[in-house]
Image (tube, rainbow, N blue to C red):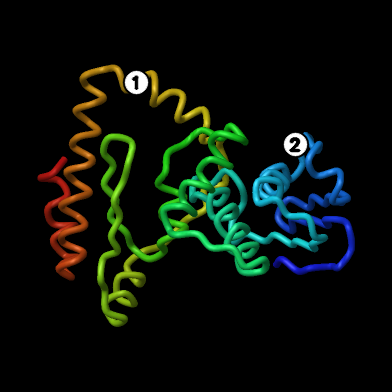
Amino acid sequence: SVVRNFEKHFSIKSINTDQELRLSVEELDNYNGNELSLITTTLRQCRIKDGLDIIIYCDFEPGTGLGGSSSLVVALITALAELFNFKFSKKQLIKFSYDIERKMQGIQGGWQDQIAAVYGGLCVTYFENGDFGTHKIDMSDNYTDFFNSTLFLLQIGENRESSHIHQEQKQAAQKISYQAKMKNIVALAAKCSDMIAQENLEEIGCNGREWM
């Protein structure tokens, strides 16, 4: 929730983490605290000079690996763009939110979370030479409902910092065996996306062992 308060301060509250922050508009540029810094950095980069009341609520806790921080930044930028009437293309929004999270906040990771948040739905993305292309799989409403009915999500009670995982991946990426595993995963994803697009979910389960 992002609402103008017609005063010269920002009031920011996270319901999930029970954090609250109140800053004057003048204080924003020099704020370097860790509390709710993802929000303050986004406000600063969007050059917001009007007072706002911001309330954040996520359906899951931080550290679950579901791309919540990227979704939060994309949602906030989108709300600010609507409120203050500035425009982004999808690629510009992805690049802007990526820069805020990865470069300015130092949260390690790739582009995939921002892409998923901006495009929505079930997407296939190809990365090459520092760029990417994305298309959404066209699914009928009935098939989407059926597909969703086959999925479930479990909370196992453990959270983790994705930055540590990305550091390990960067170190492992130099190994030939690791590169071969990644190629197999990419090939597996391509086969799965084709079967989903063909509405052939049964084949995914049947051929899983063969692909591995």
* Quarter of image, res 36: top right
Quadrant in which the C terminus appears: top left
How many marks can you see? 2
Which label is found at residue 172? 1
Asked whether the beta carbons under mark 2 and mark 1 sit within 8 Å of each other, the answer is no
Identify the element where label 2 is drawn.
loop
Q: Amino acid at mark 2?
A: Asn
Mark 1 Cα-neighbour bin, 10 Å: few <14, some 14–19, many ≥20:
few
Q: Position of residue 24 (x, y in %)?
A: 88, 50
The dot on residue 80 is none
Outermost bottom residue: 142
Q: Earlier in the sequence, mark 2 or mark 1?
A: 2
In the depicted view, which residue is nearer to us: 63 or 30? 30
Q: Is residue 169 above or below residue 83?
A: above
Question: Residue 146 placed where, x, y %?
Answer: 30, 75
Q: Quadrant of the N terminus?
A: bottom right
Q: Residue at x 51, y 33 (%)?
A: 108
Pinpoint residue 69: horizontal percent, then vertical percent.
57, 48
In screen coordinates, is 14 left or right of 187? right
Task: Please tell me which residue is depicted at 13% across the width and 57% down the height of the picture.
Answer: 206
Q: Residue at x 47, y 36 (%)?
A: 109
Name the front one of labels 2 and 1.
2
Residue of label 2: 34
Q: Out of 84 and 66, give the one closest to the viewer.
A: 84
* Residue 72 position within the rendered picture, expressed as x and y whole percent measured from the top left: 59, 54
Q: Amino acid at mark 1?
A: Ala
Q: Is residue 17 left or right of residue 157?
A: right
Q: Quadrant of residue 105?
A: top right
Q: Name the quadrant containing residue 81.
A: bottom right
Question: Who's the residue at 18% across and 57% down the image?
Answer: 205
Q: CA distance from mark 2 to mark 1?
A: 30 Å
Decide which of 151, 180 is in the foreground and name it: 180
